[in-house]
Amino acid sequence: VFSRDVSCIPYYEECQKTADWLLSRTKHKPKFAIICGSGLGMLAETLQDQEVFKYSDIPNFPQSTVQGHVGQLVFGELKRKACVYMQGRFHMYEGHSLYKVTFPVRVFKQLGVETLIVTNAAGSLADSYKVGDIMVIKDHVNFPGLAGYNALSGPNDERFGPRFPSMSDTYDKDLRGLALDLSIKLGYSHFVQEGVYCMVGGPNFETIAEARLLHKLGIDAVGMSTAPEVVVAKHCGLKVFGLSLITNQVLKEYGSNEAVNHEKVLEISKKRAGILQDFVTELVAQINSNNTN
Ligand SMILES: O=P(O)(O)O[C@H]1O[C@H](CO)[C@@H](O)[C@H]1O
Ligand code: HPA
């Protein structure tokens, strides 16, 4: 489940074939790819001149199985910049191999994308965060990756990137700075944070003991995605920027009657998607005007 079957058809060619299929059907040449987190598919709604491809029609593409992940690529223009949105991501807990989870990222690279913007729904461990806050991802802890379930495990194809890529500067410093400046300009600074995201395998939410452990480790927000996509993006030379929407507080005390569930996560995502949408739109516009990209 976790690693690539080395006997399967060559991965680079497989990605290229999918990219060529898309390029022959869309007039857009995206430089930005945006992955929509749980319940955040509406981020794509502001795209002008849309062209939509269902995952079930795209060669080699996996299928979405999680509620809140529609399962289509939307190409279009945001402030006259060509973008592709992934409405529905793939998670390890769905049973996808990590090479399938990250397949779209490599396809984006072959489409000519230069910057990947990841979004996700996450639970907060940081005491100062509130539900509805947006966290600019400064760095991540890839728990499955540390345990050997890494999207880069298996044969390395140098055409994507090096065997041993550095991850010390993964979330682009200029883009993070730009986003924090922008949050002030947009009047968002009271709910925009910067912090560390941690990926756990899921699909269960954390036990109290696990939540306390993550909190002690200095992790600010936890989710079940993002790290594999980001590792693969960095490996193949994409600039990376990430936003976590805080959909719930992770319980750290015993005896509470509260419990998180996916429906509550989707409810908050739906409520805050508009704000996230504006943030991403303005950011994409600014990246160009500042020549950051
Ligand atoms: O990370 P995204 O896809 O936003 O979704 C988050 O929300 C779901 C749990 O409610 C999990 O899939 C978790 O990873
Ligand atoms: O509390 C959480 N834990 C893990 N993943 C999540 N995704 C949204 N909220 C959470």
Image (cartoon, rainbow, N blue to C red):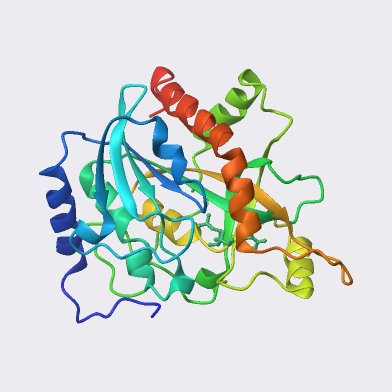
The single residue placed furthest to the right in the displayed view is 255
Instruction: Check the image and report above or below for 250 versus 202.
Output: above
Taking the spot 10% from the left edge, 44% from the top edge, the residue there is 24
Taking the spot 38% from the left edge, 63% from the top edge, the residue there is 64
Q: Quadrant of residue 137?
A: top right
Q: Position of residue 82 (x, y in %)?
A: 29, 31
Quadrant where the N terminus sits is bottom left
Name the quadrant where ligand 1 sits. Answer: bottom right
The single residue placed furthest to the left in the displayed view is 24
In depth, the one of 289 and 203 nearer the eye is 203
Q: Is residue 114 left or right of residue 173?
A: left
Instruction: Check the image and report above or below for 26 versus 263.
Output: above
Q: Position of residue 9 (x, y in %)?
A: 16, 73
In depth, the one of 222 and 109 nearer the eye is 222
Number of dots carrying numbers = 0
Q: Position of residue 272 (x, y in %)?
A: 61, 39
Taking the spot 30% from the left edge, 48% from the top edge, the residue there is 73
Taking the spot 72% from the left edge, 46% from the top edge, the residue there is 131
Q: Position of residue 198 (x, y in %)?
A: 61, 60
Q: Is residue 288 left or right of residue 148?
A: left
- Residue 245 visible (yes or no): no
In depth, the one of 65 and 22 nearer the eye is 65
Quadrant where the C terminus sits is top left
